[in-house]
Amino acid sequence: MASLSASLDEGKLSFLNSIQKNCIVLDYASLAALAAIVREGSFERAARALHVTPSAISQRIRLLEDRVGCALVVRGQPCEATAMGRRLCQHVDRVRLLEQELHEALPTLAPTGDFRVPLPIAVNADSLATWLAPALATFAAEAPVLLEVAVDDQDHTAEWLRSGIVLAAVTGSARPAVGCNSQPLGAMRYLAACSPSFMERHFLDGVSAGSLARAPSLAFNARDELQTRWAQRLCQRHIELPHHSLPSTQAFVTATLSGMGWGLHPQSLITCHLDDRSLVELVPDTALDVPLYWQYARASSALLAGLTRQVLTAGRGALIPPRAAASEQTTVARPAERR
């Protein structure tokens, strides 16, 4: 019996050792260091944010990389996470949101002081400049969060979600990323406009494929294809548009008013300028409606659910309902003149 008992004890010990050997136990101090590096862009700023030394940050990352068996940070200016690093950062963000809920339910476990958790999202610049910022401000005033807002073109914000950098995004893609939900917000209506003097200088004989290929346009960045899409729909073929790069929604309007170029603007931003004739449409009744969607991590917390409600309410109140946008979208006739 004694030998049988000893054998069983040895078996249990071997089983437990096997579990410990094959399971990766995450060190959340190291994960917090990783998230801080990605958020702050450098080891030094991450150290200041966490109130530790840069050498302590380096040691935590080295231990974590040894633990998972791969690189997690690409050292540079700024430092960036690898694919696995982004997955771990997303895990940290979700855990922090869940911990915040636990702190609210069990105040004795909450840290002292005003504790707020980071909540990373990605949005397009035009939404942020029109209807979204007030919604984010309302949510942030009521919730214990620090919003980290990344800005990119609506056709590319979903990439931030798929890579794990953010937990939610305003995107032009209806198809949800893996592990996410997608809900329609409505459509943002864009109008192609320029100043009267620009119109006279570049489109005196009409807006055509030839004149569009010569007149300078405005683009938010290299990923901004709105102007190209509008021109292609107008002329029924692709046109290489010369363009100035101007990564600011408000500067877009200011530059257009100043005669720098023509561009697609959210209707809500230029209605007053169209009314006072400081801007004119290139071709009336050729609005471009861009559907927008809110995608967010499915395994979310009450905080992310609260942000979702706020964003959906604001978007559906400010944007064109999807069905209305589809029915009102004008089919543009091909210009008679080709230059």
Image: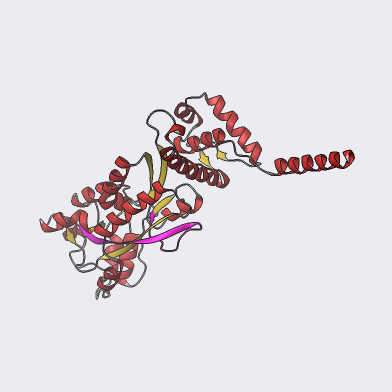
Q: Is residue 36 above or below residue 121?
A: above
Secondary structure predominantly adopted by residues drawn in magenta: strand
Quarter of the rendering containing residue 2: top right
Picture coordinates of residue 86, whole percent (x, y): 52, 45
Q: Is residue 123 left or right of residue 3?
A: left
**Residue shown at 58% from the left, 31% from the top:** 60
Q: Is residue 203 above or below residue 307?
A: below
Q: Is residue 183 magenta?
A: yes
Q: Nearer the viewer, residue 261 or 79?
A: 79
Q: Is residue 231 left or right of residue 270?
A: right
**Residue shown at 52% from the left, 45% from the top:** 91
Q: Is residue 18 left or right of residue 107?
A: right
- Identity of the residue furthest to the front in this view: 1
Quarter of the rendering containing residue 270: bottom left
Q: Is residue 188 magenta?
A: yes
Picture coordinates of residue 146, whole percent (x, y): 37, 39
Q: Nearer the viewer, residue 199 or 83?
A: 83
Can residue 77 be spotted in the picture?
no
- Identity of the residue furthest to the top in this view: 53
**Residue shown at 29% from the left, 65% from the top:** 289
Q: Nearer the viewer, residue 61 or 191?
A: 61
Q: Is residue 111 left or right of residue 17?
A: left
| Quarter of the figure with the N terminus | top right
Picture coordinates of residue 251, whole percent (x, y): 25, 47
Picture coordinates of residue 179, whole percent (x, y): 50, 56
Quarter of the rendering containing residue 336: bottom left
Q: Is residue 143 above or below residue 182?
A: above
| Quarter of the figure with the C terminus | bottom left
Q: Is residue 136 above or below residue 210?
A: above
Can residue 97 be spotted in the picture?
yes
| Magenta part of the chain | 170-194
Q: Nearer the viewer, residue 80 or 293?
A: 293
